[in-house]
């Protein structure tokens, strides 16, 4: 399985199944959730074609998302960042629907705590809070911007994950 | 029937006791400390970290003057025994180090047991060390450069921030990371304390003779919170088949000074001398009468650590620590030095790319041997 495919399956799972359970609002499910087919493909305006020397390419996640019956997100984009065709990192942009209490720290933590294989720890970068955790052979950074959540996953052996993260933090969804 | 006068007296005593206790419920004090820690962690800052560690050889002083722009941008100046020893700057993935006192390099070299741990990465997933080490050597190595007082830059050598929590690292083994970790260390200590109270000299529970820390100046607006250590475990207590031995928490005296909702100072003393009597009673032992309390504390902690390490537990470090913060939220900018030479810094503990850790351990061992070798006889 290619690294991107691994990342795709992981991230699609996080974006949909993870977020649903993170909300802990199954009672509110029918009215609050967005059907997977209704989740829009987002475009991150201002995302350059090259980020820190890595080629940025938008990946199609419509199919796995459409299979999800309901979710608390209404928009999603996934970008791969490659060097010589090898995926070094992925950037996922998720927009929560209006039923999600994105502004509450409790909600954010419940989402973040479902990501990665270690307990996420908050760090401060350039005045923003970023949650860091690890996945299998990858480092994962998560941060929030308005109704959006951004998730940067980089290979564990990628040499510039923090520099890349700081670059990604400049992006405005 | 209780006489009315006695009732009045009793009520007065209760009122007096409540008024003098100097603190509300301990949970409130704990909440205030936690909130102050959280508020402070987010801020840029400078700090002075001072540690005095005591063992049989005497006392050893280490200070770290630090500047933190954010969690991935900081610099630190280390002195050991009053001598400038090490400068370190981190900017995201990049790490620059120079030794001002090359005789101390050995204290910072990678230890053989940590060959699998590198630095860098957002998370430094320890399972992920790439077999591909840093680019082929084209210039001098860090082992050659560091003894010459020169700055060495490892573009991907910054210490890991996730996956190597200080719970996994011995306190005292890395003064730079220890100093950066103080606020998190305090947070962990909250969980280890019996309770946290707001300091008041007028409290009925306050024991002046047992207080090693400075009092907040009147009118300064500084509030001091004291951590109370739990009771020592009984000799008969066991866990996982082992005798429960006292931990650092049982000897810890810690005070956190808060001003305007932010932590401005932390003081800690692992005070074994104050619990010698308890230790003697619990473990049915007698300490030599011809030694000072401080000497006995060293003897006691050595004996205790022998048991703890035999059980696979971390030793208790006999130390005093003070951490003073300044410039909170101010304009703290961390620049990297410009006069650097690029090389892998994986020979230093907790530094360098994970992929370079194995090579770093070999380099560290070779450098340690060189440093330990006697100087060649004069020709």
Image (tube, coloured by chain):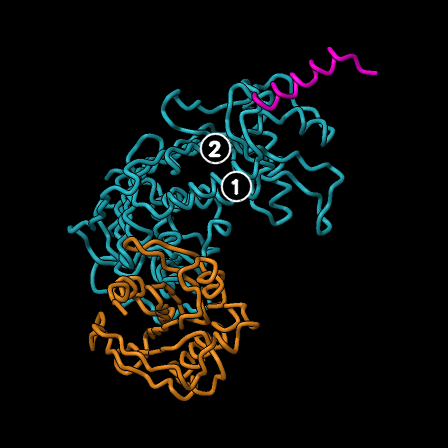
Chain colours: A orange, B cyan
Contact flag, marks 1 and 2 (Cβ < 8 Å):
yes
C-alpha distance separating marks 1 and 2: 10 Å
Relative depth, front residue between B38 and B370:
B38
Relative depth, front residue between B20 and B213:
B20
Q: Is residue B40 above or below residue A49?
A: above
| Range shown magenta | B1-20
Q: Residue at x 55, y 18 (%)?
A: B209
Dominant secondary structure of the magenta stretch?
A: helix
Of the 4 image quadrants, the one containing the N terminus of chain B is top right
- Circle 2 packing at 10 Å, graded few (<14), some (14-19), many (20+), is many
Q: Which mark is residue B189?
A: 1
Q: Residue at x 54, y 31 (%)?
A: B197
SS assignment at label 2: strand
Q: Which residue is mark 2?
A: B268
Total number of numbered discs in the rendering = 2
Q: Chain of mark 1?
A: B
Q: Chain of mark 2?
A: B
Tell me, yes or no, if residue B80 can be seen here: yes
The earlier-in-sequence mark between 1 and 2 is: 1
């Amino acid at each position: 399985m290619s690294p991107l495919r691994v990342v795709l399956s992981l991230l699609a799972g996080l974006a949909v199944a993870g977020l649903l359970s993170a909300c802990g609002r199954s009672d509110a499910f029918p009215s609050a959730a967005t059907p997977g087919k209704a989740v829009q493909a987002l475009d991150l305006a201002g995302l350059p074609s090259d980020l820190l020397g890595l080629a940025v390419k938008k990946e199609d996640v419509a199919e796995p998302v459409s299979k999800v019956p309901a979710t608390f997100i209404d928009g999603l984009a996934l970008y791969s960042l490659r060097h010589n065709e090898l995926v070094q990192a992925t950037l996922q942009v998720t927009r929560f629907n209006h039923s999600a209490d994105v502004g509450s720290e409790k909600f954010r933590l419940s989402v973040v705590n479902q990501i990665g294989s270690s307990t996420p720890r908050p760090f401060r970068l350039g005045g923003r809070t970023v949650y860091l955790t690890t996945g299998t052979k990858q480092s994962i950074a998560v941060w929030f911007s308005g109704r959006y959540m951004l998730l940067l996953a980089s290979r564990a052996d990628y040499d510039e994950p923090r520099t890349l993260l700081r670059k990604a933090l400049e992006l405005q969804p | 029937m209780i006489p009315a006068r006695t009732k009045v007296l009793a009520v007065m005593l209760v009122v007096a006791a409540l008024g003098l206790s100097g603190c509300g419920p301990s949970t409130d004090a704990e909440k205030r400390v936690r909130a102050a820690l959280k508020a402070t962690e987010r801020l840029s800052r400078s700090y002075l970290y001072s540690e005095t560690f005591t063992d049989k050889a005497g006392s050893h002083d280490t200070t770290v003057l630090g500047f933190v722009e954010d969690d991935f941008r900081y610099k630190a100046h280390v002195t050991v025994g009053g001598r400038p020893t090490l400068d370190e700057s981190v900017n995201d993935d990049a790490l620059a180090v120079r030794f001002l006192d090359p005789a101390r390099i050995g204290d910072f070299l990678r230890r053989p047991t940590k060959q699998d741990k590198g630095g860098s990465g957002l998370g430094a997933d320890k399972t992920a060390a790439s077999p591909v080490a840093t680019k082929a050597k084209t210039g001098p190595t860090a082992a050659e450069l560091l003894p010459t007082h020169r700055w060495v830059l490892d573009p991907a050598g910054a210490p890991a921030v996730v996956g190597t929590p200080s719970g996994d690292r011995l306190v005292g083994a890395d003064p730079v990371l220890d100093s950066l970790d103080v606020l998190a260390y305090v947070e962990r200590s909250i969980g280890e304390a019996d309770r946290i109270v707001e300091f008041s000299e007028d409290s009925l529970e306050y024991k002046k003779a047992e207080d090693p820390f400075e009092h907040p100046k009147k009118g300064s607006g500084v509030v001091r919170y004291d951590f109370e250590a739990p009771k020592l475990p009984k000799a008969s207590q066991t866990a996982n088949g082992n005798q429960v031995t006292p931990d650092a928490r049982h000897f810890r005296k810690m005070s956190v000074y808060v001003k305007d909702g932010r932590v401005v100072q932390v003081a800690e003393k692992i005070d074994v001398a104050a619990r010698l009597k308890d230790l003697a009673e619990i473990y049915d032992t007698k300490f030599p009468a011809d030694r000072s309390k401080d000497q006995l504390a060293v003897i006691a902690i050595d004996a205790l650590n022998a048991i703890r390490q035999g059980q696979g537990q971390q030793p208790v470090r006999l130390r005093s620590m003070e951490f003073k913060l300044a410039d909170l939220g101010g304009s703290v900018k961390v620049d990297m030095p410009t006069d650097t030479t690029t090389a892998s810094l994986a020979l230093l503990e907790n530094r360098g790319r994970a992929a370079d850790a194995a090579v770093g351990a070999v380099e560290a061992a070779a450098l340690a041997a060189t440093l330990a070798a006697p100087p060649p006889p004069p020709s």
